[in-house]
Amino acid sequence: MEQSINIERMEQAVSLFGSFDKNIGRIEKAYGVTVLNRGGAVKISGEPENVAKAAKVLEGLIMLINKGEELNDQNVGYCMSLVNEGSEEQLSSLAADCICLTMNGKQVKPKTLGQKKYVEMIRDHTIVFGVGPAGTGKTYLAVAMAVKAFRAKEVNRIILTRPAVEAGEKLGFLPGDLQQKVDPYLRPLYDALFEMLGAEAFQKYQEKGNIEVAPLAYMRGRTLDDSFIILDEAQNTTPEQMKMFLTRLGFQSKIVVTGDITQIDLPDGKRSGLKEAVRILKGIDDIAVIRFSEKDVVRHRLVQDIIRAYEKFEKK
């Protein structure tokens, strides 16, 4: 069987096929079809069912190109997974609005339906829990939403915090004062802020107190008004720490809590504050929980395979 899809412009075909026909090669391999560019049309040939699926993927990718999206390993793979599930009608909602621009002018956007829902939840709720595996953009998108709110003067401060799990014995061997000891734990948060604000602006805002990156212990006894607060790696909080943190919420503030409950580094026998909070706070108005899956991973393609392999192993 053969099916044709019309291509309006040459640039569409160039983007669709990708460098050295990489995108098309991946689709051909996945569905056992042949895809050729012939005089303003893409021709797909092979088994009828596979041709139909490949055509849906290609139509989805053309739609993304028309919306200004750049094709890469991640969105090609994601289109294929939606078509394989029979959810291709959701492809039209995939191209999302830009949250903010990085210092290099790169657009920060949600790249999966899960990420899109997460961004909408952060916009519409006061407290959001983002739970899921590494590489799903939980922290990065939360920082982008914080920067957007800060630039729009919706909040006066951005506060990023993480539990320093080894803040007992092991940190004691590191040189420097407490801030220097915990800085390695906070590095991913610094990196995301540097990318979006630039090192100079970050420094300026930090000196003025508009941006604070600090270990969770620094939050005790404070009320955080007019702030966008992100608690990262929350699976490593104890239930007491989580309760302490959530009750810091002040007026005109938002809280985003992110974590991966498959990567708990707490000493044996200690309960995870994240796991408990998600259970306890279920159903409370203005608190939302989103669970990401390996399909929302936007890092290297192998990261999805690694997560799947570990999940399989743990189920055994």
Image (spheres, helix red, strand yellow):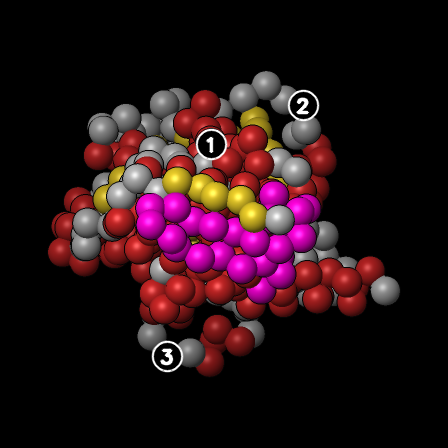
Q: What kind of residue is marked 3? A: Pro
Badge 2 density bin: few <14, some 14–19, many ≥20, Cα 10 Å: few
Picture coordinates of residue 218, whole percent (x, y) = 42, 50
Q: What range of the chain is rendered magenta? A: 29-54
Image-based side of 89 in relation to 270, left or right: left
Counting residues from the N terminus, which is met first, the one under dot 2 or under dot 1? 1
Mark 1 residue element = helix
Residue 282 appears at what percent x and percent y?
Answer: 68, 28
Q: Say which amino acid is labelled 1.
A: Ser
Query: Dot 2 lies on which element?
Result: loop
The reply to whether the C-beta atoms of the residues labelled 3 and 2 are less than 8 Å apart is: no
Q: CA distance from mark 3 to mark 2?
A: 45 Å
Give the quadrant of the C terminus.
Answer: bottom right
> Would residue 53 be counted in the magenta stretch?
yes
| Residue toward you, 202 or 310 | 310
| Mark earlier in primary sequence (1, 3) | 1
Q: What label does residue 283 carry, if any?
A: 2
Labelled disc at residue 175:
3
In the image, 48 versus 126, the foreground residue is: 48
Instruction: Kindly identify the amino acid type of the residue bearing the numbered disc 2.
Output: Gly
Asked whether the beta carbons under mark 2 and mark 1 sit within 8 Å of each other, the answer is no
Regarding residue 311, the answer to whether it shows in the image is: yes
In this picture, is 106 found above or below 25? above
Q: Is residue 247 above or below residue 58?
A: above
Question: Which residue reaches farthest top?
Answer: 285
The residue identified by callout 1 is: 92
- The residue located at (19%, 54%) in the rendering is 104
Q: Is residue 200 left or right of residue 170?
A: left
Label 1 crowd (10 A; few <14 / some 14-19 / many >=20):
few
